[in-house]
């Protein structure tokens, strides 16, 4: 898995409802209801922790899933909702002041 760092975009609205995170993109009004596992990834998207570490530390330790499957799912998590402008993605830690990173 290519190293990725993710940060939540400021162009979203998000609210926790029960154990799921509800997110709406301000870019195109796309709405996402994230399940528990994806919510954990969403909450851990701190711009400094590599996605692979988030997967290993949060997902693999809590759910019965292989690291390979968890990394595949995490890649989809970044690519699919990320395509609606709700994440910044970079191959290096994202500088919060400059917002450096590629919005996806």
Image (tube, rainbow, N blue to C red):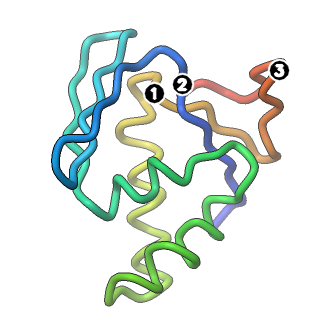
Does 48 sit above or below residue 97?
below
Residue 79 image position (x, y, % from top left) = 44, 43
Q: Quadrant of residue 17?
A: top left
Q: Residues within 10 Å of mark 3 (few under 14, many from 20)?
A: few
Q: Are marks 1 and 2 in contact (CB under 8 Å)?
A: yes
Does 69 sit above or below residue 95?
below
Rendered image: mark on residue 86: 1
Does 17 sit above or below residue 95?
below
Left-right relation of 44 to 46: left
Q: Which residue is mark 2?
A: 9
Q: In the image, what residue occupies the spot 64% across and 38% down?
A: 89
Left-right relation of 94 to 43: right
Q: Are marks 1 and 3 in contact (CB under 8 Å)?
A: no
Left-right relation of 26 to 54: left
Quick one: SS at disc 2? Answer: loop
Residue 49 image position (x, y, % from top left) = 71, 57
Q: Identify the mark nearer the N-term, 1 or 3.
A: 1
Quadrant for the N terminus, please.
bottom right
Q: Quadrant of residue 66?
A: bottom left
Quick one: SS at disc 1? Answer: loop
Q: In the image, what residue occupies the spot 32% across and 64% down?
A: 37
Q: Quadrant of residue 95?
A: top right
Residue 48 image position (x, y, % from top left) = 75, 49
Q: Identify the mark nearer the N-term, 1 or 2.
A: 2
The residues tagged by marks 1 and 2 sit, at their Cα atoms, a distance apart of 5 Å
Q: Which residue is mark 3?
A: 97
Viewer-side label of 1, 3: 3
Q: Identify the mark nearer the N-term, 3 or 2.
A: 2
Quick one: SS at disc 3? Answer: loop
The residues tagged by marks 1 and 3 sit, at their Cα atoms, a distance apart of 18 Å
């Amino acid at each position: 898995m290519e190293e990725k760092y993710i940060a939540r975009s400021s162009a979203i609205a998000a609210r926790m409802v029960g154990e799921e995170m509800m997110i709406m993109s301000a870019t195109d009004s796309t709405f996402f209801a994230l399940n528990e596992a994806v919510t954990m990834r969403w909450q851990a998207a701190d711009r400094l922790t590599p996605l692979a570490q988030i997967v290993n530390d949060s997902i693999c330790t809590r759910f019965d899933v292989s690291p390979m499957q968890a990394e595949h799912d995490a890649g989809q998590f970044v690519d699919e909702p990320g395509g609606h402008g709700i994440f910044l993605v970079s191959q290096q830690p994202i500088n919060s002041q400059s917002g450096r990173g590629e919005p996806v």
